[in-house]
Image (cartoon, helix red, strand yellow):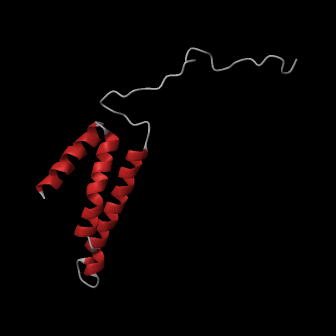
Amino acid sequence: MMAGRVLELAAGFGLALGVFPRLMALALFAFLVPATFISHSFWLAAGTPAFQGQLINFSKNIAIWGGLLFVAGSVGQPCVLPRRTVTSEKAGEPENRQIVGVGK
């Protein structure tokens, strides 16, 4: 239980601050998937007053899965730590080049 709380806090702060956002999103996703099925098993609460609350929390966690996967799959994320950037060899060349022999 304590390890789960530490993971949630560390990965949550890391994600919020932009420190290794992909890794933090994947760590939270890996924790949240089994936690959702264990903690919010709405199918076991069918016909009881707890059903609605369990279904809402299960659906909320599914939405969070989507957000975490979006962050993990995004390329252009802000990041606190510097990243390597790929630069073009022709970075100084102008974008619009004239094509010789076309139209004349």
In the picture as drawn, the residue positioned furthest to the left comes out as: 2
Q: Position of residue 34 (x, y in %)?
A: 27, 63
Q: Is residue 1 above or below residue 27?
A: below
Q: Position of residue 94 (x, y in %)?
A: 62, 16
In the picture as drawn, the residue positioned furthest to the top comes out as: 92
Q: Residue at x 39, y 55 (%)?
A: 66
**Quadrant into which the C terminus falls:** top right
Please tell me in which quadrant of the rendered image residue 89 appears: top right
Question: Who is closer to the viewer here, 59 or 101?
Answer: 101
Q: Is residue 89 left or right of residue 30?
A: right
Q: Residue at x 83, y 21 (%)?
A: 102
**Quadrant into which the N terminus falls:** bottom left
Q: Position of residue 64 (x, y in %)?
A: 34, 56
Q: Is residue 56 above or below residue 9?
A: below
Q: Is residue 56 left or right of residue 6?
A: right
Please tell me in which quadrant of the rendered image residue 91 appears: top right
Q: How many marks?
A: 0
Please tell me in which quadrant of the rendered image residue 98 appears: top right
Q: Is residue 103 above or below residue 50?
A: above
Q: Position of residue 83 (x, y in %)?
A: 36, 28
Q: Is residue 58 above or below residue 69?
A: below
In the picture as drawn, the residue positioned furthest to the front comes out as: 89
In the picture as drawn, the residue positioned furthest to the bottom comes out as: 47
Q: Residue at x 63, y 20 (%)?
A: 95
